[in-house]
Image: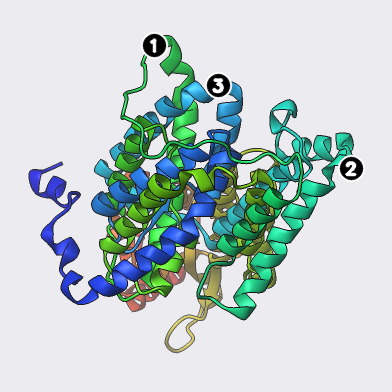
Amino acid sequence: MTATGLRGLLPGRRDYADLPRTWRGDLLAGLTVGIVALPLALAFGVSSGAGAEAGLITAIVAGVVAAVFGGSHVQVSGPTGAMVVVLAPILAERGLGALALVSVLAGIFVVLAGVARLGRLVGLIPWPVLEGFTLGIAVIIGLQQIPAALGIDSGSLHGNAIAAAGQAIATADWAAAWPTLAVVAGVAAVMLLVPRLTRAVPGSVIAIALASIATSLIPNDIADIGELPAGLPMPALPAITLDGLTPLILPALTVAALAAIESLLSARVAASHSDTGAYDPDRELVGQGLASMAAGVFGGMPATGAIARTAVNLRSGGRTRLAAVTHALVLLAIVMIASGVVAHIPLAALSGVLMVTAATMVHGRTVRAILRSSRSDAVIFVITAIITVTVDLIYAVAIGIAVAALFALRQLASSGGVHREELAGPVAPGDDRIAVLRLDGALFFGDAQRVLDRVARIDGVRVVILRMSQLQLLDATGAQVLAELIAGLERRGVTVLVKGVQDRHERLVEHAGVRGALGHENHVYDDLAEAVAHARELVAGERSPA
C-alpha cells in the first residue's frame, strides 16, 4: 500500500468539518445513546460469560477508538448480541483467560483486512442471507436467556443454545424460579409499554430501575451483577505463548469475520439513512480492529458496530464522531460515579432486556417481504437462519452465500439460449439447408453443454451460421464447448460460419481453438449479410469454402 493510501485510513481534520454547527446535537445524541447502551453493555457482557465489567469496558474503550479511527461519522461501537453468540462458546471452552488474547488477535485480523482493502466485499452478501443471519442471532440471544430467566447457572449446561435451553427447561425448579421469571416478565412488559407512553427515557433504563428497586425491597435470592470497579483497569498485554496462541487462531478468525461483517453492515445502513456522507469500509475495518485490540488490552471483549445504538444516535441528532465519543464518556462517568448502584441490578433484569432486544431485531414486514419475493430468496433466508441457530454463524453466512450463488447461476444459465432465425433478403433456392442460429444470454460452465447440445442436434443442413453478437457472457468452458461443437459439425460435413465475435470475447475464442475448428480461417464475419451470401454460395456449389 502506498503512503497516500495509508493516510486515507487514518483520522484527519475532515472528520470534524461539520462540528461547529452540529456539536450541540452531537452532545445530546451521545448522552441519549450512552443511557441506552448501559443496560445493553451490562447484559451482553454477562451473557457472553466475560462479565458485566467486560461489557462496560468494551463500550467505553472500543466506543472511543472506533469513533476516532473508524470509517463512519455516526457509527456507535461496543459489545453486540452477535458477538456474544460467537464469543460465549469460545470462553466456555477456553476459559475467561482467553478473552484478552482472542480480542487482540481478532482485532489484528480485522485491521489487516482493512489494510488489504477487503471492506467492499460485504456488499456481495445477499439481502436474504443478512436477514436470515439476523433472525438466527435473535433466536440464539433469546434462547441464551432462558437459563438465567429460570435461575439456572448456564455453566452447568452443555451444547448449543437450543440444547442448553432445553436442559434448563427440563431441569428447572419451577416453584423456586417464579421470582426470576417475574423480574424477566416485568422488565419485558415495561420495555414494551414505555415507548407507547414516552420516548424521552429509554424503556430499558426505566425497566431496570424498577426491577432493581423491587428486588431491593422484597426479600429474594435473585443474583445481581456484583461489585464493579469505579473506573477503567490498567491496560495489560495478554500473555502470549505458542501453546496458548495456536488453538485460538481459528476462534479469533471467526470473531474477526463477524466483527467485520456486522460493523460494515451497520455502517452501510447508517450511511443510507443519514445525510452525513458516505463511509469508508476499509477505514471502518481498521478502526474496528483497533477498537477490539484496545478493548482486549483493558480487559474487554471484541467490539463491532452496533446497529441499534447507531440508529438511536441518528434519531437523536448525531452527525459527527463527537456523538459516539460522548456516549463512551457518559458510560465512563456512570461507572466512576454510580458503580455501587449498578452493582445491585438483578441479572434477571438483564435477561429481560436481551429477550426484548432479540425480539425487536426481527421485523415481521421484512420477513414477509423476503418470503413473498421469490422461492429462491425464501430458501436462502430459511437455510441461513437455521444454520445460524443450529451450527455456526460464519458457516451460516458462507453457506447462505453459496446457496445464493447457486440460484444466481441457475438463473443466469436459464437466460442463455439458441434461437433459429429466418435468412435475411429474398428467399433463394437451398435456403432450407442453411441455419442461422443466434446465441443469447450466457454461455458458461453452468449451462454451456445444454445450450450447445441443441445446436448439435440440428439436422438436414449444409451450413450453420452462429451469431455471437448477442452473447453477453462467455467463459473458458463455454468457448471450449463451442470449439468442440464446431469441430463436430465440420466432421459431419456441415460448414460453420461464425458471425459477430465481440472484442471482449476475441482472446478467449482464440485461445479455446474456435477459429482453428472452422473449416477455413476466413469463416469469421462481422456482417451477417456477407455470411448469408457465402452460405448460399456454398449450398449452390458456386464456389469452394476457400
Q: Residue at x 70, y 45 (%)?
A: 145
State the image coordinates of residue 372 (x, y, percent, origin top left). Answer: 69, 72
Residue 489 seen in this snapshot: no
Is residue 173 depicted above or below 94 in this figure?
Answer: below
Q: Position of residue 93 (x, y in %)?
A: 60, 23
Q: Which residue is situated farthest in the left direction here?
A: 3
Residue 158 image-quadrant placement: top right
> Marks 3 and 2, Cα distance to the nearest angstrom?
32 Å
| 109 displayed left or right of 102 | left
Residue at x 33%, y 41% (from the top left corner): 289
198 sits left or right of 113 in the view: right
Q: Nearest the camera: 145 or 158?
A: 145
The residues tagged by marks 3 and 1 sit, at their Cα atoms, a distance apart of 15 Å
Name the amino acid type tagged 2: Trp
First in sequence, mark 3 or 1: give its number.
3
Reading the image, the residue beneath label 3 is: 94
For the residue pair 122 and 453, the one nearer the viewer reads as 122
- Give the residue pinned by disc 2: 174
SS at circle 3: helix
The answer to whether one can see residue 405 in this image is yes
The residue singled out by tag 1 in the image is 242
